[in-house]
Image (cartoon, rainbow, N blue to C red):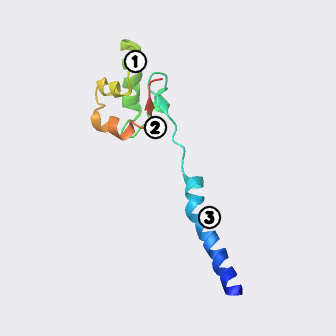
Amino acid sequence: MRKYQKILVLFIAALFLVSVVPMALAEEVEKININTASVEQLAKLKGVGTEFAQRVVEYRETNGPFAKAEDITKVKGIGSKTYEANKDIITVE
């Protein structure tokens, strides 16, 4: 009987580790609104440093807000690869 209790406890512990721990370790991704984000916020995007982030701000000031997330590729130096790497966190709300 004691052997089965140990197995049950180990099973429950393993189940806990497999189901709960990954959720606790999951990082919530912050959405970045390319129409309102600061240079510092835009620089957090993959493949976008402060230079390209400044270009995004300047583009938006000159041309108005982005209509859709894909429009970030209209900024010189930001292509489809950069957009694809960030499309899940870019927003234009």
Q: Amino acid at mark 1?
A: Arg
The dot on residue 44 is 2
- Within the image, what quadrant is residue 83 found in? top left
Give the labeled residue for mark 3.
16
Q: Secondary structure at mark 3?
A: helix
Give the labeled residue for mark 1.
60
Residue 6 placed where, x, y %?
67, 81
Q: Secondary structure at mark 2?
A: loop
Neighbourhood count class around disc 2 (C-alpha, 10 Å): few under 14, some 14–19, many 20 upward: some
| Residue 14 position (above or below residue 43) | below
Q: Residue 87 versus residue 52: which sits nearer the camera?
A: 87
Left or right, 50 with reference to 21: left
Q: Amino acid at mark 2?
A: Lys
Q: Do the numbered discs 3 and 1 sit on residues whose CB atoms are within 8 Å? A: no
Residue 12 placed where, x, y %?
64, 70
Neighbourhood count class around disc 3 (C-alpha, 10 Å): few under 14, some 14–19, many 20 upward: few
At a point 52% along the width and 37% down the height, the residue shown is 30
| Residue 14 position (above or below residue 20) | below
Give how far apart the Cα atoms at labels 3 and 1 are.
47 Å
Q: Secondary structure at mark 1?
A: helix
- Earlier in the chain: of badge 1 and badge 2, it is 2
Q: How many marks?
A: 3
Q: Amino acid at mark 3?
A: Phe
- Earlier in the chain: of badge 2 and badge 3, it is 3
Give how far apart the Cα atoms at labels 2 and 3 are.
33 Å
Q: Quadrant of the N terminus?
A: bottom right
Left or right, 38 with reference to 76: right
Neighbourhood count class around disc 1 (C-alpha, 10 Å): few under 14, some 14–19, many 20 upward: some
Residue 55 placed where, x, y %?
36, 24
| Residue 92 position (above or below residue 84) | above
Give how far apart the Cα atoms at labels 1 and 2 are.
18 Å
